[in-house]
């Protein structure tokens, strides 16, 4: 039995009422009973191109039947309590069914990016030892089935079953339902999801969250039961980022379950198609990155045709003027920051009324301050300097440390990362710097972690650097982010080549392809240098490289 939170933590959050021990699958089943004929999920309109299946629209009772069939199959394959289901699907109904079926079978789901290939999946398998691997048949130029079989035969021997998306689709429609399928053995302290997060380490880290961790978000979303909740029953919620991490699970799947909503799926991100979905499906809540919000506003596309009531903006600091414009058009803008480890700050009209300030800052739950939005009354944070001393004066900058009923207890099967990430008082050290604004608010300042944030995908520079240094022509390499108007950042590689050699960006991309590296991690800017700048102890001076990139980006965006 996997129990990751200590008894003291469990007793504390249960006694205080933050954890109710209701699992996510039980919350879903209540929605089925309450709203059986309500539209539950809408497939992306381009599903035929995406997965070679026709798009569907299904109600809660239709969805539940397919979940019963999916869970019956998993149980028959020996997938039950504490077993792990590895899933590599695009945002389609089949992915949502995989979540719900895994939970009904009392197991854990670990979703991974569609772009990941052998290089990344090898590490995933070695860390979590999944018992079953569900994956898309083929996407773009990658044959996923051949890749999976090769991994299962050689490096991921624990995988007993490989199920393609089309096979899973047929299973959820035709498989015989077991009589005991609803004999669920979960409790709120069992792991629901294992998401993957990147930091300064070369390999992804496995971040497990329990059903109670996710259930705590009811205090943020359920506006009909809890003071400060931002959504109502039956909201139409659109998900445009991959349903694999905090942005899509925590701001899409979980609120959909909590408010018994309609989930509108989208993949891959296509601004024109997504905008049509917002209008045609009457979406009332979604998440967008700032660049998309700016584009829609400047084109005059956020207008009376949209039914949006709430718009979450995340992945980068939004321009304050966008919040003013959204509010003028009757849309409540929400500034969000969060991580897969179960951290989250949300600026809403319930806690920061001033729109410009809301775009820049977040509520600062500390010193036992009481909040109108009761979600914050369960959260403890502190900002610390490099020596671990707390910072409280306006203008000071330090690392945000976080503790809450939402936060994981530690990384899955990676004690070395857990030890480095939590302090002696149980606070998770986020690796992000925040600046004190005043007694009740803080503002995101910078990332401590050395990563590139490409359209929401966090790329650890150490991983890409290690790969580049394997190239026979490259002596040394360092990676930083290059500003990109659409994606925020792309990977820029500074490389030192062997004497007498030359190398091109196309050669590097070909090498990355041969190494089976996810495409979003490939360098998109190449800078040949004589040496990588380092300090006296040999550490790469990334600040020098970032300043160089800033100069170059001005003339070559």
Image (spheres, rainbow, N blue to C red):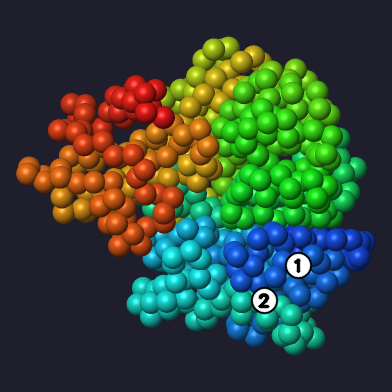
Residue at the extreme top of the image, as rendered: 394
Q: Is tag 2's residue or tag 1's residue first in the polypeptide sequence?
A: 1
> Which secondary structure, mark 1?
loop
Near-viewer residue (158 or 239): 239
Residue 449 is left or right of residue 175, and the answer is left
Q: Residue at x 48, y 64 (%)?
A: 140
* Residue receiving disc 1: 56
* Residue receiving disc 2: 169
Residue 231 image position (x, y, % from top left):
83, 42
Res 145 seen here: yes
Residue 447 image position (x, y, % from top left):
46, 31
Which numbered disc covers residue 329? none
Residue 158 image position (x, y, % from top left):
45, 77
Q: Residue at x 72, y 30 (%)?
A: 300
Looking at the rendering, which quadrant does residue 407 occupy?
A: top right
Near-viewer residue (325 or 70): 325
């Amino acid at each position: 039995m996997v129990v990751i939170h200590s008894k003291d933590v469990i007793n504390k959050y249960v006694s205080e009422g933050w954890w109710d021990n209701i699992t996510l699958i039980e919350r879903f089943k209540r929605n089925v009973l309450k709203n059986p004929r309500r539209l539950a999920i809408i497939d992306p309109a381009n599903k035929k191109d995406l997965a070679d299946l026709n798009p569907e629209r299904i109600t809660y009772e239709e969805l539940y039947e397919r979940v019963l069939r999916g869970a019956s199959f998993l149980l028959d394959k020996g997938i039950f309590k504490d077993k792990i289901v590895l899933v590599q699907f695009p945002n389609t109904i089949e992915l949502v069914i995989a979540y719900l079926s895994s939970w009904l079978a009392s197991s854990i789901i670990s979703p991974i990016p569609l772009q990941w290939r052998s290089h990344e999946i090898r590490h995933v398998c070695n860390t979590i030892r999944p018992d079953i691997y569900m994956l898309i048949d083929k996407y773009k130029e990658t044959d996923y089935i051949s890749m999976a079989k090769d991994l299962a035969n050689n490096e991921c021997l624990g995988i007993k079953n490989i199920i393609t998306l089309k096979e899973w689709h047929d299973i959820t429609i035709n498989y015989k339902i077991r009589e005991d399928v609803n004999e669920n053995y979960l409790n709120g302290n069992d792991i629901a999801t294992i998401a993957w997060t990147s930091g300064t380490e070369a390999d992804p880290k496995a971040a497990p969250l329990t059903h109670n961790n996710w259930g705590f978000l009811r205090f943020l979303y359920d506006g009909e039961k809890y003071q400060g909740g931002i959504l109502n029953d039956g909201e139409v919620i659109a998900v445009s980022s991959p349903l694999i991490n905090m942005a899509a699970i925590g701001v899409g799947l979980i609120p959909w379950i909590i408010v018994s909503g309609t989930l509108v799926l989208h993949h891959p991100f296509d601004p024109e198609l997504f905008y049509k979905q917002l209008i045609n499906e009457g979406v009332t809540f979604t998440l967008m990155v700032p660049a998309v919000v700016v584009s829609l506003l400047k084109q005059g596309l956020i207008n009376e045709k949209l039914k949006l009531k709430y718009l979450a903006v995340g992945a980068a600091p939004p321009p304050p003027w966008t919040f003013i414009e959204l509010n003028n058009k009757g849309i409540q803008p929400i500034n969000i920051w969060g991580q897969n480890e179960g951290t989250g700050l949300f600026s809403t009209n319930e806690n920061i009324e001033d729109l410009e300030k809301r775009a820049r800052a977040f509520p600062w739950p500390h010193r036992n301050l009481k909040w109108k939005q009761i979600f914050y009354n369960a959260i403890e944070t502190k900002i610390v300097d490099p020596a671990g001393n707390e910072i409280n004066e306006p203008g000071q900058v330090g690392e945000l440390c976080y503790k809450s009923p939402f936060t994981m207890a530690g990384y899955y099967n990676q004690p070395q990362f857990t030890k480095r990430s939590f302090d002696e008082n149980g606070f998770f050290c986020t690796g992000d710097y925040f600046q004190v604004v005043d007694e009740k608010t803080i503002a995101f300042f910078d990332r401590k972690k050395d990563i590139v944030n490409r359209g929401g995908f966090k790329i650890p520079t150490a991983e890409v650097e290690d790969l580049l240094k394997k190239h026979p022509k490259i002596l040394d390499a360092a990676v930083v982010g290059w500003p990109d108007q659409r994606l925020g950042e792309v990977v820029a590689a500074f490389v030192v080549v062997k004497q007498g050699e030359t190398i091109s960006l196309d050669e590097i991309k070909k090498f990355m392809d041969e190494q089976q590296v996810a495409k979003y991690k490939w360098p998109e800017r190449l800078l040949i240098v004589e040496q990588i700048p380092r300090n006296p102890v040999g550490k790469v001076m990334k600040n020098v490289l970032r300043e160089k990139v800033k100069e170059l980006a001005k003339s070559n965006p």
